[in-house]
Image (cartoon, rainbow, N blue to C red):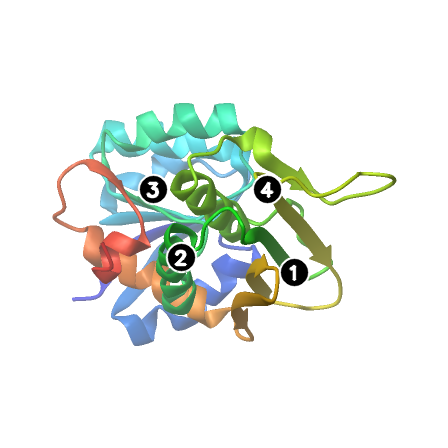
Amino acid sequence: MPLQILLNGAKGRMGQVIASVAGEMNATIYAGLDAGDDLSASISRCEVIIDFSSPGATAQVLELAQLHHKPVVLGTTGHTPAEKEHLRSMAAKIPCVWAGNFSVGVNLLFALTQRAAGILGADYDAEVVEMHHRFKKDAPSGTAARLLDIILEERQLTATALRHGRAGLTGERSPTEVGVHALRGGDVVGDHTVIFAALGERVELTHKASDRAIFARGALRAAHWIIGQPPGLYDMQDVLGLK
């Protein structure tokens, strides 16, 4: 029997793609909701919630999921650091996969970035560049934010090391800063490049998405995986067995 999904954010770009590929992933969207709809009226019959809506809706989704004992696949981005900390504690009380990017290739990029950041020392300057379509509302992207977290964790740095673009007389680059550059234009689905540049050489790790369906299939794969998992906060590394 197909997996019964409550999809929040059904009219958004990702929501529409998830609905279009659900059938091929042995799933069905039994309820597609958006801002203003009552989640509580539809939640009891679903097996899992997939949320690609807005940052302001995340807390309510997690509260209802906890109340009704439903697992969640959460793909919404754009939360502040303080909001993330609070929401992570909420999400850990239920089975929840929360990822900034559900692509298999991007999650391999995460693993490779962690490996590279650990091997290449402070003499390799780290920069992250991402580009998305003109309609994207948050920056940097959730994927870029995760890449930055990986670099900071591996190099034992805090968020104060991040440099969001540069302008004016900035002086020489310090060895501990990590550059962040968000580009917007056209219909770009999602490009991410991590650069490790030293004197004499540089290493670049790049992923380019050309079809939003890769994210939808990953989210549906996570929805199948999270069924039966114990309460806890998971990511696509867990789903794909990359940890």
- Residue picked out by circle 2: 110
Please state which of the two labelled residues, at mark 3 or mark 4, is closer to the viewer. 4
**Of the image marks 2 and 1, the number of the one nearer the N terminus:** 2
Residue type, label 3: Ser
Q: Quadrant of the C terminus?
A: bottom left
Q: Under tag 3, what secondary structure?
A: loop
Q: Is residue 192 above or below residue 60?
A: below
Residue type, label 1: His
**Of the image marks 3 and 2, the number of the one nearer the N terminus:** 3
Can see residue 24?
A: yes
Can see residue 19?
A: no
- Are the residues at dot 2 and dot 1 in contact (C-beta closer than 8 Å)? no
In the rendered structure, the answer to whether residue 158 lies left or right of residue 43 reads right
**Of the image marks 1 and 3, the number of the one nearer the N terminus:** 3
Q: For residue 42, which numbered disc appears in the image?
A: 3
Q: Is residue 98 above or below residue 136?
A: above
In the rendered structure, the answer to whether residue 179 lies left or right of residue 17 reads right
Image quadrant in which you'd find residue 61: top left
Please state which of the two labelled residues, at mark 4 or mark 1, is closer to the viewer. 4
- Residue picked out by circle 4: 175
Q: Nearer the viewer, residue 107 or 67?
A: 107
Residue type, label 4: Pro
**3D distance between C-alphas at marks 2 and 4:** 22 Å
- Residue picked out by circle 1: 132
Q: Is residue 158 above or below residue 51?
A: above
- Are the residues at dot 3 and dot 2 in contact (C-beta closer than 8 Å)? no
Q: Nearer the viewer, residue 207 or 154?
A: 154
- Mark 1 crowd level (few <14, some 14–19, many ≥20, 10 Å Cα): many
What x and y, as percent, mark residue 232?
21, 36
Residue at image x 58%, y 58%?
A: 198
